[in-house]
Image (cartoon, rainbow, N blue to C red):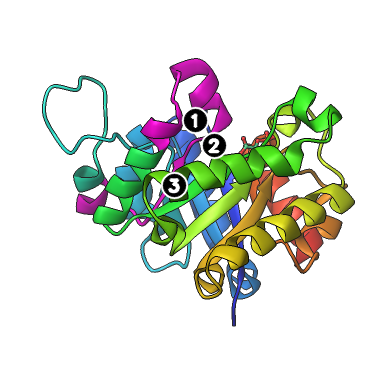
């Protein structure tokens, strides 16, 4: 069965006690794993510990970052080689918070995708428009531009075996989710655009949504046929809350 993906993005939250409790509780809800592929992105410092705890469960881990270099004088960075060393199979790339606070640009994003793929780590590539572009009805144009950049500066295969996360910047951490009509319109457009370039690649890409998912909107959004999964921030931070919203879609 082709399971939809649910990713808990814990961002800059937690400590050893929290991570242990979070994963131990989540592991008990095995029935959720039967329907969805559950992934957690803890702070990178806790990936190793998380890896020890998830053992034998179906939960998968996601790195919140990867450096574009493999090794060398890059203080504070984390490499694809290191992630592979501890068996991490997914990485978030191009999140708007990294663009905003760490000035990551399109070239950085492309290089990070290339490096991740080199180490067999599946990139979760974030795209999405800001509020002005949304209000000016430029959402499609902006998403296309971001995808086109990757294809133009590499080739269509850069998208093969990736997850595209449509994350409108104005919806992230704001409590204002995009409505289902808008999300499915954008997802459909992305599918159409990529298919127009290569008919087969699209089968190797998942398109998920992220931005203020909560207990009120999760059901409609996850059940839309154009949406392959969700990237959830705030609503996933308290494990009790996360379990509650998973139970809504169970
Ligand atoms: P949010 O975050 O659910 O808190 O809006 C989503 C994300 O940043 O991926």
CA distance separating discs 2 and 1? 8 Å
Looking at the image, residue 229 sits to the left or right of residue 11; the answer is right
Q: Residues within 10 Å of mark 1 (few under 14, many from 20)?
A: some
Circle 2 residue: 10
Q: Is residue 239 left or right of residue 104?
A: right
The residue sitting at the left extreme is 72
Q: For numbered disc 2, what is the local secondary structure?
A: loop
Q: Position of residue 152 (x, y in %)?
A: 44, 47
Name the quarter showing ligand 1: top right
- Residue matched to label 1: 14
Residue 59: percent from left, percent from top: 48, 61
As drawn, 96 above or below 212: above
Residue picked out by circle 3: 152
Residue at x 70%, y 40% (from the top left corner): 141
**Residue 124 in the image: x percent, y percent?**
49, 49
Name above or below for residue 212 compared with residue 22.
above
Q: Which residues are magenta?
A: 83-109
């Amino acid at each position: 069965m082709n399971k939809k993906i649910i990713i808990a993005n814990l961002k800059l939250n937690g400590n050893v006690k929290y991570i242990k409790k979070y994963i131990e509780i989540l592991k008990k809800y095995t029935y959720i794993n039967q329907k969805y592929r559950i992934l957690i992105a803890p702070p990178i410092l806790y990936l190793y510990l998380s890896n020890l705890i998830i053992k034998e469960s179906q939960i998968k881990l996601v790195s919140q970052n990867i450096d574009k270099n493999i090794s060398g004088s890059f203080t504070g960075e984390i490499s694809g080689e290191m992630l592979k060393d501890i068996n991490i199979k997914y990485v978030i790339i191009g999140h708007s918070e990294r663009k905003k606070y760490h000035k990551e640009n399109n070239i950085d994003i492309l290089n990070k995708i290339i490096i991740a793929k080199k180490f067999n780590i599946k990139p979760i590539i974030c795209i999405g428009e800001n509020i002005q572009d949304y209000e000016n009805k430029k959402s499609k144009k902006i998403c296309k531009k971001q995808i086109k950049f990757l294809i133009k500066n590499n080739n269509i295969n850069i998208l093969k075996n990736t997850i595209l996360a449509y994350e409108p910047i104005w919806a992230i951490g704001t409590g204002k989710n995009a409505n289902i009509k808008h999300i499915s319109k954008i997802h459909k457009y992305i599918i159409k655009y990529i298919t127009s370039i290569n008919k087969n690649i699209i089968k190797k890409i998942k398109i998920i949504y992220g931005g203020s998912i909560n207990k009120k909107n999760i059901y409609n959004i996850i059940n839309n046929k154009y949406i392959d999964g969700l990237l959830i921030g705030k609503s996933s931070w308290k494990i009790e809350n996360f379990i509650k919203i998973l139970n809504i879609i169970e």
